[in-house]
């Protein structure tokens, strides 16, 4: 039942300055869970006319005003090469060695400049031996004599022979074949050694550049760049398809969710899709479960029965209860009682399994039946969470498509219809970005809920309350951005109530963000606000009290209220 996420980063190309912000990194962390506004306070009655006077109409940066500073850096290939060259220069200058030797040293110590310096100054001889840097050649020969190649054993003049620092002689053609094969074999070519089996001398980049063609030079340089990333503990490649960027992360600086320039969001720690607020261990278990054969086993236990004779699982695909196992077994039996069909005729006393079994009446349930029932319940529980996980993922991908269409087509059209510049329509893009992010969070909350212990009833009720509030708020925002916006896109002239729509959508975006901030904060804290005496009930009471207080202090005009039909009613001033 695994659900594979598509290459959605190809669907949308959002400017990196907006993409890689952390939607839930800012805000006041001391805000209690009970601070969430009630439906009536926020004007969230679907049939009422909401009032969002508390939102400033010109708040263009509503989504990002409280976001924390990024704790990662996106590196393109040219950035990686520049850093690599800078590190080589540093080592070469401090140790007074050639750039080729500096590169070999850095590759040995995972491109850590500080480690190279420490190891070199503490044991230079040991480092030279480990890296394969020889101070003098092992083999020496005169320039006047012919030299035998160590691979093809042909004799060559001195000018046709090439050798590493060790001096072992090999002809140019053999060197080329040796290096080309090493490069074709993969990343191991960056630690190439002398072809002589007994020699540990390193082969540097200068010799490789001198001997191979441009095609192989470029391959070697790509492997060299890859080694700089893959050997570095602070930098990882973006796992987005066809993306060649890397991400440098400040370890220990906060959550691991990052967004690359290609718009692909992922967890830097486990490189799976971004999954905050769920931890990497839970995500790994959930993905494994989605792909595991265990669910097939559960389905077999829940919806099939074993043949009484050969024990092969059989699924009932016809209406009658007369079952026949496939050859070579061929056993005929009753689906209900699993007894032989020969015992269900008139000659054996009639249909024998319509009476209630005394053993079942007394509670002596068959072990196989008990296992089947347990498997059925387990499968139903998993299906409940998986369907909602997959539905939100599907909805998120659709929202990404809608966001892309909004940015490329609809905003231009809306700007022309409403006679407003596109810069004043940024609130629509902000709403869609919030929808995409909230769908991602909501998706992973179902994986969180699946692994929440069933015996922690208070935590579960509190979790489902927070999840439900966030989901309702998201659905209202999504419906407003998707359905109500169509009215203004289809209009032929500027709408008088477009500014009211702006205020409503901006308000829904802000409140939905608040709901999800509370949800994310609660899950990251392990639902710590819930204790054994029922903090969940206390929190709900505080929320209701806070809502009543906000009703009295709200900006809604005194003397009116909205009923569910959206009409205004005059309050009885004497009541």
Image (tube, rainbow, N blue to C red):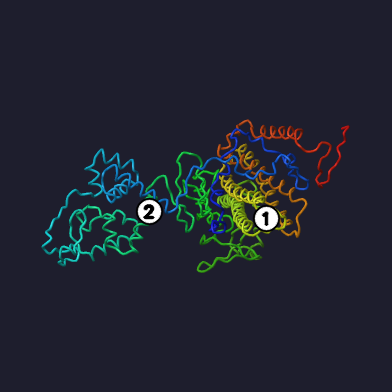
Viewer-nearest residue: 384 or 163:
163
Q: CA distance from mark 1 to mark 2?
A: 76 Å
Taking the spot 62% from the left edge, 36% from the top edge, the residue there is: 458
Q: Position of residue 437 (x, y in %)?
A: 59, 48
Q: Quadrant of residue 217?
A: bottom left
| Relative to 105, residue 326 above or below | below
- Mark 1 / mark 2, whichever is N-terminal: 2
User: Circle 1 — which element?
Assistant: loop
Viewer-nearest residue: 194 or 70:
70
Q: Is residue 323 visible?
A: yes
Q: Is residue 175 left or right of residue 293?
A: left
The 10 Å Cα crowd at callout 1, few under 14, some 14 to 19, many 20 or more, is few
Assign the N terminus to one quadrant of the image: bottom right
Residue that badge 2 annotates = 225
Q: Position of residue 180 (x, y in %)?
A: 30, 63
The 10 Å Cα crowd at callout 2, few under 14, some 14 to 19, many 20 or more, is some
Assign the C terminus to one quadrant of the image: top right
Q: Residue reaching furthest bottom? A: 327
Viewer-nearest residue: 366 or 299:
299
Kindly identify which numbered label has been placed on residue 181. none
Q: Position of residue 157 (x, y in %)?
A: 15, 65
Q: Is residue 377 visible?
A: no
User: Circle 2 — which element?
Assistant: helix
Q: Residue reaching furthest top? A: 533
Q: Is residue 213 left or right of residue 483?
A: left
Residue that badge 1 annotates = 355
């Amino acid at each position: 039942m695994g659900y594979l996420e598509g290459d959605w980063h190809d669907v949308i190309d959002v400017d990196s300055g907006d993409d890689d912000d952390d939607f839930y990194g800012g805000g006041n962390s001391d805000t209690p869970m009970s601070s969430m506004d009630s439906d009536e306070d926020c004007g969230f009655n679907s049939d009422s006319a909401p009032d969002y006077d508390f939102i400033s109409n010109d708040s263009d940066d509503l989504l990002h005003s409280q976001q924390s500073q990024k704790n990662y850096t996106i590196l393109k290939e040219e950035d990686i090469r520049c850093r690599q060259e800078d590190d080589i220069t540093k080592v070469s200058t401090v140790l007074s060695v050639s750039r080729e030797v500096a590169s070999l040293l850095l590759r040995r110590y995972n491109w850590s400049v500080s480690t190279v310096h420490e190891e070199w100054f503490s044991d230079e001889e040991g480092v030279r031996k480990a890296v394969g840097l020889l101070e003098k050649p092992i083999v020496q020969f005169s320039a006047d004599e012919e030299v035998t190649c160590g691979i093809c054993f042909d004799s060559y003049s001195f000018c046709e022979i090439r050798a590493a620092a060790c001096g072992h002689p090999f002809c140019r053609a053999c060197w080329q074949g040796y290096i080309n094969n090493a490069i074709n074999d993969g990343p191991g070519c960056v630690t190439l050694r002398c072809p002589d089996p007994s020699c540990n001398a390193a082969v540097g980049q200068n010799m490789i550049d001198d001997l191979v063609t441009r095609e192989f030079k470029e391959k070697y340089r790509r492997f060299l760049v890859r080694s700089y990333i893959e050997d570095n503990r602070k930098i990882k490649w973006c796992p987005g398809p066809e993306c060649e960027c890397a991400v440098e992360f400040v370890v220990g600086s906060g959550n691991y969710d990052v967004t690359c320039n290609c718009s692909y969001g992922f967890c830097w720690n486990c490189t799976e899709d971004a999954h905050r607020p769920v931890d990497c261990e839970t995500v790994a278990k959930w993905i494994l479960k989605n792909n595991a054969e265990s669910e097939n086993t559960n389905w077999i236990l829940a919806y099939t029965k074993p043949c009484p004779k050969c024990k092969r699982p059989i699924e009932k695909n016809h209406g009658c209860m007369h079952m026949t196992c496939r050859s070579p077994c061929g056993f005929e039996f009753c689906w209900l009682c699993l007894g032989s069909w020969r015992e269900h005729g008139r000659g054996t006393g009639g249909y024998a399994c319509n009476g209630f079994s005394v053993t079942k009446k007394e509670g002596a349930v068959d072990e196989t039946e008990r296992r089947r029932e347990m498997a059925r319940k387990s499968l139903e529980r998993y299906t409940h969470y998986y369907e909602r996980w997959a539905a939100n993922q599907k909805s998120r991908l659709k929202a990404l498509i809608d966001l892309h269409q909004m940015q490329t087509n609809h905003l231009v059209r809306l700007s022309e219809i409403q006679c407003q510049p596109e810069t004043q329509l940024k609130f629509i893009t902000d709403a869609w970005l919030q929808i995409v992010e909230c769908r991602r969070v909501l998706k992973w909350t179902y994986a969180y809920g699946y692994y929440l212990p069933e015996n922690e009833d208070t935590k579960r009720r509190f979790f489902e309350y927070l999840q439900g509030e966030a989901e309702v708020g998201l659905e209202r925002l999504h419906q407003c951005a998707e359905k109500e916006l169509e009215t203004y896109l289809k209009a032929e002239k500027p709408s008088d109530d477009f500014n009211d729509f702006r205020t409503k959508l901006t308000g829904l975006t802000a409140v939905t963000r608040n709901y999800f901030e509370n949800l994310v904060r609660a899950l990251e804290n392990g639902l710590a606000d819930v204790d054994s005496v029922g903090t969940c009930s206390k929190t709900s009471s505080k929320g209701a009290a806070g809502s009543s207080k906000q009703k009295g202090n709200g900006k809604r005009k005194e003397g009116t209220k909205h009923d569910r039909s959206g009409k205004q009613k005059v309050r009885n001033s004497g009541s």
